[in-house]
Image (tube, coloured by chain):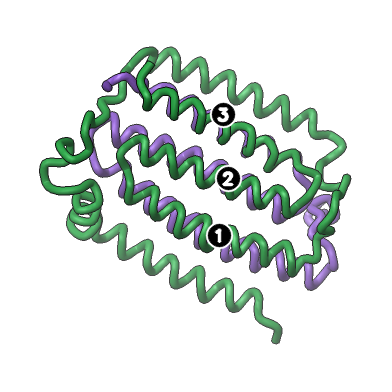
Amino acid sequence: MDDLLLNQFLLLGAVLFCIGVYGVIARRNAVLVLMSIELILNAVTINLVAFGAFHGSVAGSVFALFVIAIAAAEVGVGLAIVLLIYRNRGSVDLDDMAEMKG
Amino acid sequence: MVAQNIFFFAIAAVIVYSGLRVVTSANVVHAALHLVVVLASVAAQYVLLAAEFVAATQVLVYIGAIIVLFLFGIMLTRAKLGRDQDLTHKHWMGGAATALALFAVMVYALIDEFGWTRTPLPADPRIASVNGSNTATVSDAVFSTYLVPFEVVSVLLLAALVGAIVLARKD
Protein backbone atom coordinates (compact mmCIF):
# COMPACT_ATOMS: atom_id res chain seq x y z
CA MET A 1 0.00 0.00 0.00
CA ASP A 2 2.96 2.26 0.64
CA ASP A 3 3.23 3.40 -2.90
CA LEU A 4 2.28 7.08 -3.09
CA LEU A 5 5.15 9.42 -3.89
CA LEU A 6 5.53 12.70 -2.05
CA ASN A 7 6.33 14.32 -5.38
CA GLN A 8 3.03 13.50 -7.04
CA PHE A 9 1.22 15.67 -4.50
CA LEU A 10 3.83 18.42 -4.69
CA LEU A 11 3.68 18.44 -8.50
CA LEU A 12 -0.11 18.58 -8.40
CA GLY A 13 0.26 21.57 -6.09
CA ALA A 14 2.73 23.15 -8.53
CA VAL A 15 0.31 22.68 -11.47
CA LEU A 16 -2.57 24.19 -9.51
CA PHE A 17 -0.37 27.07 -8.33
CA CYS A 18 0.70 27.92 -11.88
CA ILE A 19 -2.90 27.75 -13.14
CA GLY A 20 -3.79 30.22 -10.38
CA VAL A 21 -0.88 32.52 -11.27
CA TYR A 22 -2.00 32.51 -14.91
CA GLY A 23 -5.53 33.39 -13.81
CA VAL A 24 -4.36 36.28 -11.62
CA ILE A 25 -2.32 37.75 -14.50
CA ALA A 26 -4.67 37.08 -17.41
CA ARG A 27 -8.14 37.76 -16.01
CA ARG A 28 -9.73 41.20 -16.15
CA ASN A 29 -12.71 40.67 -13.86
CA ALA A 30 -11.84 41.27 -10.18
CA VAL A 31 -14.08 38.41 -8.95
CA LEU A 32 -12.29 35.98 -11.29
CA VAL A 33 -8.92 37.15 -9.95
CA LEU A 34 -10.11 36.37 -6.42
CA MET A 35 -11.14 32.88 -7.63
CA SER A 36 -7.64 32.36 -9.07
CA ILE A 37 -6.19 33.34 -5.68
CA GLU A 38 -8.31 30.55 -4.16
CA LEU A 39 -6.65 28.10 -6.58
CA ILE A 40 -3.22 29.30 -5.37
CA LEU A 41 -4.22 28.90 -1.71
CA ASN A 42 -5.49 25.38 -2.40
CA ALA A 43 -2.17 24.48 -4.02
CA VAL A 44 -0.41 25.62 -0.84
CA THR A 45 -2.79 23.60 1.33
CA ILE A 46 -2.16 20.43 -0.70
CA ASN A 47 1.56 20.89 -0.08
CA LEU A 48 1.03 21.42 3.66
CA VAL A 49 -1.10 18.29 4.04
CA ALA A 50 1.28 16.22 1.87
CA PHE A 51 4.29 17.26 3.98
CA GLY A 52 2.29 16.57 7.14
CA ALA A 53 1.60 13.02 5.91
CA PHE A 54 5.23 12.67 4.84
CA HIS A 55 6.58 13.59 8.27
CA GLY A 56 3.83 11.74 10.11
CA SER A 57 3.08 15.01 11.91
CA VAL A 58 -0.21 16.72 12.59
CA ALA A 59 1.25 20.20 12.05
CA GLY A 60 0.53 20.06 8.31
CA SER A 61 -3.18 19.53 8.91
CA VAL A 62 -3.29 22.27 11.56
CA PHE A 63 -1.69 24.84 9.29
CA ALA A 64 -3.94 23.74 6.42
CA LEU A 65 -6.88 24.63 8.69
CA PHE A 66 -5.32 28.03 9.40
CA VAL A 67 -4.87 28.64 5.67
CA ILE A 68 -8.54 27.78 5.07
CA ALA A 69 -9.62 30.21 7.82
CA ILE A 70 -7.43 32.98 6.40
CA ALA A 71 -8.78 32.29 2.90
CA ALA A 72 -12.30 32.80 4.22
CA ALA A 73 -11.29 36.14 5.78
CA GLU A 74 -9.50 37.17 2.59
CA VAL A 75 -12.51 36.43 0.38
CA GLY A 76 -14.84 38.30 2.72
CA VAL A 77 -12.74 41.47 2.73
CA GLY A 78 -11.78 41.10 -0.96
CA LEU A 79 -15.37 40.83 -2.15
CA ALA A 80 -16.36 43.78 0.06
CA ILE A 81 -13.65 45.85 -1.65
CA VAL A 82 -14.78 44.66 -5.11
CA LEU A 83 -18.35 45.58 -4.22
CA LEU A 84 -17.24 49.05 -3.09
CA ILE A 85 -15.33 49.54 -6.35
CA TYR A 86 -18.38 48.44 -8.34
CA ARG A 87 -20.58 50.85 -6.41
CA ASN A 88 -18.23 53.77 -7.01
CA ARG A 89 -17.35 53.11 -10.64
CA GLY A 90 -20.00 50.78 -12.07
CA SER A 91 -17.42 48.28 -13.28
CA VAL A 92 -15.08 45.62 -11.88
CA ASP A 93 -12.75 45.67 -14.89
CA LEU A 94 -9.21 45.79 -13.52
CA ASP A 95 -7.94 47.58 -16.64
CA ASP A 96 -10.10 50.60 -15.77
CA MET A 97 -8.40 51.09 -12.41
CA ALA A 98 -5.35 53.14 -13.29
CA GLU A 99 -5.51 56.12 -10.88
CA MET A 100 -2.15 55.22 -9.34
CA LYS A 101 -0.45 55.30 -12.75
CA GLY A 102 2.18 58.04 -12.74
CA MET B 1 -0.16 0.42 -9.25
CA VAL B 2 -2.20 0.48 -6.08
CA ALA B 3 -5.79 1.66 -5.79
CA GLN B 4 -4.71 4.90 -4.08
CA ASN B 5 -2.54 5.76 -7.09
CA ILE B 6 -5.38 5.17 -9.54
CA PHE B 7 -7.64 7.43 -7.50
CA PHE B 8 -4.88 10.03 -7.17
CA PHE B 9 -4.38 10.35 -10.91
CA ALA B 10 -8.12 10.32 -11.69
CA ILE B 11 -8.75 13.10 -9.15
CA ALA B 12 -5.65 15.02 -10.25
CA ALA B 13 -6.88 14.98 -13.87
CA VAL B 14 -10.22 16.41 -12.70
CA ILE B 15 -8.41 19.12 -10.68
CA VAL B 16 -6.21 20.19 -13.60
CA TYR B 17 -9.08 20.20 -16.13
CA SER B 18 -11.46 22.14 -13.89
CA GLY B 19 -8.70 24.49 -12.75
CA LEU B 20 -7.96 25.35 -16.37
CA ARG B 21 -11.67 25.92 -16.97
CA VAL B 22 -11.78 28.29 -13.96
CA VAL B 23 -9.12 30.53 -15.52
CA THR B 24 -10.24 30.23 -19.16
CA SER B 25 -14.04 30.03 -19.06
CA ALA B 26 -15.85 32.84 -20.86
CA ASN B 27 -18.73 32.66 -18.36
CA VAL B 28 -18.26 33.92 -14.79
CA VAL B 29 -20.84 31.57 -13.26
CA HIS B 30 -19.32 28.56 -15.06
CA ALA B 31 -15.93 29.54 -13.64
CA ALA B 32 -17.41 29.57 -10.11
CA LEU B 33 -19.03 26.15 -10.65
CA HIS B 34 -15.75 24.71 -11.96
CA LEU B 35 -14.11 26.12 -8.83
CA VAL B 36 -16.57 23.96 -6.81
CA VAL B 37 -15.28 20.88 -8.68
CA VAL B 38 -11.66 21.85 -7.98
CA LEU B 39 -12.33 22.39 -4.27
CA ALA B 40 -14.24 19.10 -3.90
CA SER B 41 -11.46 17.20 -5.70
CA VAL B 42 -8.83 18.78 -3.46
CA ALA B 43 -10.91 17.60 -0.49
CA ALA B 44 -10.77 14.10 -2.01
CA GLN B 45 -6.98 14.35 -2.15
CA TYR B 46 -6.95 15.23 1.55
CA VAL B 47 -8.92 12.04 2.26
CA LEU B 48 -6.28 10.16 0.25
CA LEU B 49 -3.64 11.69 2.54
CA ALA B 50 -5.62 10.53 5.62
CA ALA B 51 -6.44 14.12 6.66
CA GLU B 52 -10.19 13.69 6.88
CA PHE B 53 -10.80 16.65 9.20
CA VAL B 54 -9.14 19.04 6.74
CA ALA B 55 -11.26 17.49 3.97
CA ALA B 56 -14.47 18.08 5.95
CA THR B 57 -13.43 21.66 6.73
CA GLN B 58 -12.61 22.21 3.06
CA VAL B 59 -16.12 21.13 2.05
CA LEU B 60 -17.82 23.15 4.80
CA VAL B 61 -15.84 26.38 4.53
CA TYR B 62 -14.89 26.50 0.86
CA ILE B 63 -17.84 24.91 -0.91
CA GLY B 64 -20.36 25.89 1.75
CA ALA B 65 -19.33 29.47 2.43
CA ILE B 66 -16.72 30.86 0.06
CA ILE B 67 -18.45 29.74 -3.15
CA VAL B 68 -21.70 31.28 -1.93
CA LEU B 69 -19.79 34.52 -1.29
CA PHE B 70 -18.41 34.35 -4.82
CA LEU B 71 -21.85 33.79 -6.31
CA PHE B 72 -23.15 36.78 -4.32
CA GLY B 73 -20.18 38.80 -5.56
CA ILE B 74 -20.98 37.86 -9.16
CA MET B 75 -24.63 38.72 -8.63
CA LEU B 76 -24.01 42.06 -6.89
CA THR B 77 -21.45 43.25 -9.45
CA ARG B 78 -23.94 42.37 -12.18
CA ALA B 79 -21.47 40.43 -14.27
CA LYS B 80 -22.91 39.27 -17.55
CA LEU B 81 -24.45 35.86 -16.92
CA GLY B 82 -23.91 34.64 -20.46
CA ARG B 83 -20.71 34.41 -22.43
CA ASP B 84 -18.44 37.43 -22.17
CA GLN B 85 -15.40 37.83 -24.36
CA ASP B 86 -13.94 40.58 -22.19
CA LEU B 87 -12.97 38.41 -19.23
CA THR B 88 -9.42 37.72 -20.40
CA HIS B 89 -6.73 40.23 -21.29
CA LYS B 90 -5.61 40.68 -24.86
CA HIS B 91 -2.09 39.99 -23.60
CA TRP B 92 -2.84 36.67 -21.88
CA MET B 93 0.23 35.13 -23.56
CA GLY B 94 2.48 36.95 -21.07
CA GLY B 95 0.59 35.36 -18.18
CA ALA B 96 0.83 31.93 -19.79
CA ALA B 97 4.58 32.36 -20.33
CA THR B 98 5.06 33.46 -16.71
CA ALA B 99 3.06 30.49 -15.41
CA LEU B 100 4.95 28.02 -17.62
CA ALA B 101 8.34 29.41 -16.59
CA LEU B 102 7.34 29.23 -12.92
CA PHE B 103 6.13 25.66 -13.45
CA ALA B 104 9.39 24.64 -15.10
CA VAL B 105 11.40 26.04 -12.18
CA MET B 106 9.18 24.30 -9.62
CA VAL B 107 9.26 20.94 -11.45
CA TYR B 108 13.05 21.10 -11.65
CA ALA B 109 13.36 21.95 -7.96
CA LEU B 110 10.88 19.29 -6.83
CA ILE B 111 12.33 16.47 -8.94
CA ASP B 112 15.84 17.46 -7.91
CA GLU B 113 15.00 17.56 -4.20
CA PHE B 114 12.43 14.81 -3.65
CA GLY B 115 12.84 12.51 -6.66
CA TRP B 116 11.21 9.21 -5.71
CA THR B 117 10.65 9.89 -2.00
CA ARG B 118 7.64 7.93 -0.82
CA THR B 119 4.87 9.29 1.34
CA PRO B 120 4.53 6.87 4.26
CA LEU B 121 0.76 6.57 4.19
CA PRO B 122 -1.10 4.60 6.83
CA ALA B 123 -2.01 1.20 5.42
CA ASP B 124 -5.13 1.17 7.57
CA PRO B 125 -6.31 4.49 9.04
CA ARG B 126 -7.64 2.70 12.13
CA ILE B 127 -4.22 1.25 12.93
CA ALA B 128 -2.28 4.31 11.86
CA SER B 129 -3.40 6.72 14.55
CA VAL B 130 -2.64 5.12 17.88
CA ASN B 131 -4.24 7.92 19.89
CA GLY B 132 -7.63 7.56 18.26
CA SER B 133 -8.67 9.13 14.98
CA ASN B 134 -6.77 11.76 13.03
CA THR B 135 -9.45 14.29 13.98
CA ALA B 136 -8.79 13.77 17.69
CA THR B 137 -5.05 14.26 17.15
CA VAL B 138 -5.65 17.46 15.17
CA SER B 139 -7.97 18.91 17.81
CA ASP B 140 -5.49 18.04 20.57
CA ALA B 141 -2.76 19.90 18.66
CA VAL B 142 -4.97 22.92 17.93
CA PHE B 143 -5.95 23.34 21.57
CA SER B 144 -2.51 22.73 23.07
CA THR B 145 0.56 23.33 20.89
CA TYR B 146 -1.10 25.75 18.48
CA LEU B 147 -3.43 27.50 20.92
CA VAL B 148 -1.93 30.98 20.42
CA PRO B 149 -2.06 30.85 16.57
CA PHE B 150 -5.63 29.54 16.87
CA GLU B 151 -6.66 32.53 19.00
CA VAL B 152 -4.87 34.89 16.61
CA VAL B 153 -6.81 33.38 13.70
CA SER B 154 -10.09 33.86 15.54
CA VAL B 155 -9.27 37.53 16.20
CA LEU B 156 -8.29 37.87 12.53
CA LEU B 157 -11.65 36.42 11.46
CA LEU B 158 -13.44 38.89 13.75
CA ALA B 159 -11.43 41.78 12.29
CA ALA B 160 -12.20 40.59 8.73
CA LEU B 161 -15.91 40.32 9.58
CA VAL B 162 -16.03 43.86 10.99
CA GLY B 163 -13.92 45.16 8.09
CA ALA B 164 -16.14 43.54 5.46
CA ILE B 165 -19.28 45.00 7.04
CA VAL B 166 -17.74 48.48 7.33
CA LEU B 167 -16.57 48.37 3.70
CA ALA B 168 -19.73 46.99 2.15
CA ARG B 169 -22.50 48.85 4.00
CA LYS B 170 -24.17 51.87 2.48
CA ASP B 171 -23.82 54.99 4.59
Q: CA distance from mark 1 to mark 3?
A: 23 Å
- Residue found 52% across the figure and 76% down from its top: B162
- Residue found 16% across the figure and 41% down from its top: B129
Q: Please indicate, yes or no, whether residue A99 appears anywhere in the rendered image.
A: no
- Chain B colour as displayed: green
Q: CA distance from mark 2 to mark 1?
A: 13 Å
- Chain A colour as displayed: purple
Query: Which mark's residue is nearer the viewer, 1 or 3?
Result: 3
Q: Residue furthest left?
A: B130
Position of residue A28 in the picture relative to residue B47 (left or right): right
- Pick the quarter of the image with the N terminus of chain B: top left
Q: Please indicate, yes or no, whether residue B142 appears anywhere in the rendered image.
A: yes
Residue that badge 3 annotates: B13
Q: Quadrant of residue B13?
A: top right
SS at badge 3: helix
Q: Would you say the residues marked 1 and 3 are in contact, meaning their CB atoms lie under 8 Å apart?
A: no
Residue that badge 1 annotates: B66
Q: Is residue B72 above or below residue A94?
A: below
Mark with earlier residue (2, 1): 2
Q: Is residue A90 above or below residue A22?
A: below
Q: Amino acid at mark 2?
A: Val
- Label 2: few (<14), some (14–19) or many (≥20) C-alpha neighbours in 10 Å: some
Q: Position of residue B118 (x, y in %)?
A: 31, 19
Q: Quadrant of residue A8?
A: top left
Q: Would you say the residues marked 2 and 3 are in contact, meaning their CB atoms lie under 8 Å apart?
A: no
SS at badge 1: helix
Q: Position of residue A78 (x, y in %)?
A: 62, 61
Residue that badge 2 annotates: B37
Q: Amino acid at mark 1?
A: Ile
- For disc 1, the chain is B
